[in-house]
Image: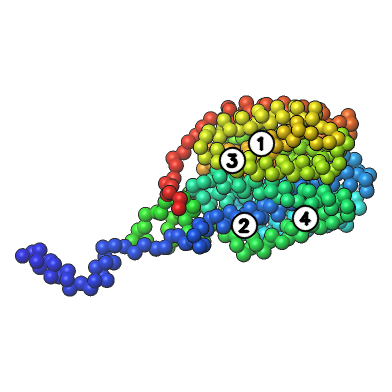
Amino acid sequence: MWLSGHWRRLALVPHHRRVTQTVPARPPISRRVGRVHRAWWVALVAFVALVGAAAFRATPSVMIEPFREEFGWSHGTISFAISVNIMLYGLTSPFAAALMERFGMRRVVAGALSLVAVGSGLTVFMTASWQLVLCWGLLVGLGTGSMALAFVATVTDRWFVARRGLVSGILTAGTATGQLVFLPLLAVLVSDHGWRPASLLVSGVALAAVPLVWFLLRDRPEDVGVLPYGAAPPAVDAHAAGAPSVAGAAPVEPGSGAGRRAITALTAAARTKAFWLLAGTFAICGASTNGLVGTHFVPAAHDHGMPVTTAAGLLAVIGIFDLVGTVASGWLTDRFDPRLLLGVYYALRGVSLMVLPLLLADAVHPPMLFFIIFYGLDWVATVPPTIALCREHFGASGPIVFGWVLASHQIGAALVAFGAGLTRDAYGSYDAAWIGAGALCAMAAAMSLAIRRRLPRRPAVAAPT
């Protein structure tokens, strides 16, 4: 009797009310652009922006000799301007990561590209070395630093849960792609038309990337109603209002200043041994790549009789294989212990640098090609494992802490860029710089293996579609 009465009362309830009472409505949590997850479009725009900024990174190596010929400046003077740029590139990075938390990636990256365009464009009017330091060092250093590899860490942490290592490798390779695309062209422009058209080209490329960033880059997945790529859908409370929480997203402290967040993250990280080991190894990474090979390989090869355009072409080939090596390193980081990867990368890099003085000649030969291919594969393959270790040890503050680790990278690069120039002025050769950098890489390999693992609980990961 009770059951029959119950069903009679239930029958009087309208069908749509019975459904809403038994199955809570679920808010939309995912949208796609076509059949591709929105995160991949954000990664593509970030890649293009990094390529635009990397146009300047290819400039110094082909500008040293033209500046010496036109203005009479020494290697040390020009290298000082380059070292200021490299150092500001690194010191700006952690504050830029905090600014992206506060004001959004789109505003910070668009402003940074504009600053690169202004700094590079103003160099055509300079007549004194202090103006080179102002344009190349200050303006372009601040601009490129504001969208450095901390930008890569921010994009991967916000938009991806699955495939983080792979994406960080692809985005990091954007700098190599910029070098690949622009270095041979810049070398030809400098040789045929002088250095001023090359500076204007870099300015135009950076400026052209600004509208793309402004209209297509988005700060967070929840801004467009999606989850990070690979994140499991969160549980939905039938009585809760608002957007669902997003797995893997870093919490934002409301009202906290960018500078305060950057300093707070540094203060906390500096109490750990892992931070100092990561900062030390990455400083050596910068010294042995941007600071030494990226800045001085072309003039060093020219000292042995190799044409500047040929040497620039070899540096561009490094960019080709760096693209392959960094993406492969990201894939390996998702599968193997990042400490072991770093140890192998640094050890092999050190051996190759010690051999380089024996390979430099007036023409390209097979052993030199082997060095170029090998060094390209190892160029910034260290970045995905380093980002992974920052995320592992420092959690939500990982992108900002990586910004400080990147600062050490650029400090090391700046010191060696300046020191190698002084070495060339004093001894007439770069041999001592190559051998010293190789020894430093051996130290970095040992430091990498000394980092302890700290495995956090993994967030829920949905099978990518």
- Is residue 293 visible in this depiction of the protein? yes
Q: Residues within 10 Å of mark 4 (few under 14, many from 20)?
A: many
Task: Write the residue at 91% across / 53% down.
Answer: 127
- Give me the C-alpha separation between circle 2 and circle 3: 21 Å
Sequence-wise, which precedes: disc 1 or disc 3? 3
Kindly report which numbered mark, 4 or 1, lies closer to the viewer in this rendering.
1
Looking at the picture, which amino acid does disc 1 mark? Answer: Asp
Q: Secondary structure at mark 3?
A: helix
Sequence-wise, which precedes: disc 1 or disc 2? 2
Sequence-wise, which precedes: disc 4 or disc 1? 4
Q: Quadrant of residue 125?
A: bottom right
Give the labeled residue for mark 2: 45
Q: Looking at the rendering, in which quadrant would you find the N terminus?
A: bottom left
| Label pair 2/4, CB-CB below 8 angstroms | no
Sequence-wise, which precedes: disc 2 or disc 3? 2
- Give me the C-alpha separation between circle 2 and circle 4: 18 Å
Q: Secondary structure at mark 2?
A: helix
Left or right of 304 on screen, residue 46: left
Looking at the picture, which amino acid does disc 3 mark? Answer: Ala
Give the labeled residue for mark 3: 328
- Give me the C-alpha separation between circle 1 and circle 3: 10 Å
Residue 235: image x %, image y %?
37, 54
Q: Establish if 421 lies above or below 185.
A: above
Residue 84: image x %, image y %?
78, 44
| Label pair 4/3, CB-CB below 8 angstroms | no
Relative depth, front residue between 202 and 88: 202
Give the labeled residue for mark 1: 378
Residue 426: image x %, image y %?
89, 31
| Label pair 4/1, CB-CB below 8 angstroms | no
Give the labeled residue for mark 4: 202
Residue 237: image x %, image y %?
35, 58
